[in-house]
Image: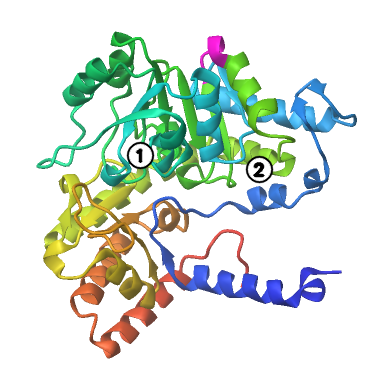
Amino acid sequence: MSLKETDPEIFEIIQKEKQRQSEGIELIPSENYVSPAVLEAMGSVLTNKYSEGYPRKRYYGGQENIDDMEELAQERAKKLFGAEHVNVQPYSGSPANIAVFMALLKPGDKILGMSLAHGGHLTHGHPVNFSGKIFNVSQYGVDKETGLIDYDEIRRIAKKEKPKLIISGATAYPRIFDYKNLSDIAKEVSAYSMADIAHVAGLIIGGVHPSPFPFTDVVTTTTHKTLRGPRGGIIMCKKEYAEAIDKAVFPGLQGGPHDHINAAKAVALKEASTPEFKEYAKQIVKNAQVLASELLVYRFNLVSGGTDNHLVLVDLQNKRVTGKEAEEILDKIGLTVNKNMIPYDTRSPFDPSGIRLGTPAATTRGMKEGEMREIARWVKEAIECHQDKALLKTLREQVRQMSLNFPVPGIKD
């Protein structure tokens, strides 16, 4: 029986979500659309198989096809990133980070990561997260005036605190990371270097963001976001850490891998190896920079003054709306963004001073610089005139019409 016949309630929810995605524009930097091929792999019969262990060394029988698939995914990631060893089994980015910590550290060891309030990630040492509860954490941020990472300050903190692991990577930092510099700092204090490239993996493959290889000891990433694959994770590392990483993933933290998702990872990695993907990555950055430039014209304050990557972090304090209010206003006209803290924010994370905008999903649909200028105008008009219900209704229809001109991959009319 079909899904519609078996569970009409869930079917209807999915249909409504298809409509929402088709008639609006996703501007959350961590969101993207997978290809029909990736969707097909995720919905395949590989979900029926249980495969504890690693290729050619499983605990269950009937693994010949699964082994071929997982080895293919590993080899594709090695080639694309220049990695010595790859584990494709992590269920997502956070489990991948947990595995690295458990492989290289002991509870109570010191780690140094970027503060969540300054653009980092929960798993990089926030006190409410496992990373902040199990390990002794020091954190770095950005300069208050420039909004940029001060690598000399990281070096100072590292020499003072002597962490065992230094983490780079962010969820709301609109500039590039100097992985070589961070790796050098780690070596100076005899620490491991780790790069969480979840947000910029696709940009790295596309050649529009520096790579953490060959400098960094261990690299983690999600396979969605700019990589445009399924919700999942990958760990890449130098050969000397391979055994420890693999044991930390299985049997340390996980049971059987999600074979259907790993197959979809392999498909996404193949798609990312094409010349078209490199052009896509370049367009993501072009679009983000045009979006940033237009917002500056409309007198929006941008953290760090602009962007080098796929995202723009907007400080709304001069616009007299909060991040939560802006998110709700833009949602009304079909622009999906997320409220976000800005560095040195004095407001709550539930109602911060900023919003975060990104271009990966819109770029996947084929939108380019002209569309970014329209989006910036819509953001301006909606936020500055949000009490004008007639205007919001007009803007909603304009967003809808543009959206329908750029179909979402995998969604049929």
Question: Which quadrant would residue 19 be assigned to in this image?
Answer: bottom right
Viewed as shown, does residue 1 lie left or right of 383?
Answer: right
Amino acid identity at mark 1: Ala
Amino acid identity at mark 2: Ala
Residue furthest to the right: 61
Disc 2: which residue: 264
Q: Position of residue 284 (x, y in %)?
A: 37, 47
Question: Which quadrant would residue 232 be assigned to in this image?
Answer: top right
Q: Earlier in the sequence, mark 1 or mark 2?
A: 1
Question: Which quadrant would residue 395 be assigned to in this image?
Answer: bottom left
Viewed as shown, does residue 173 lie left or right of 95?
Answer: left
Q: Residue at x 29, y 42 (%)?
A: 173
Q: Are marks 1 and 2 in contact (CB under 8 Å)?
A: no
- Is residue 210 in view from this perspective? no
Q: Give the main secondary structure, helix, strand or loop, of the magenta stretch.
A: helix
Of the 4 image quadrants, the one containing the C terminus is bottom right
Q: Position of residue 10 (x, y in %)?
A: 69, 71
| In the rendered image, the vertical position of residue 176 relative to residue 404, given as above or below | above
- Is residue 234 in view from this perspective? yes
Mark 1 falls on what kind of element? Answer: loop
Extent of the magenta region: 237-241
Disc 1: which residue: 170
Q: Residue at x 79, y 43 (%)?
A: 46
| Disc 2 crowd, CA 10 A, few/some/many (<14, 14-19, 20+) | many
For the residues marked 1 and 2, what is the alpha-carbon distance in whole angstroms?
25 Å
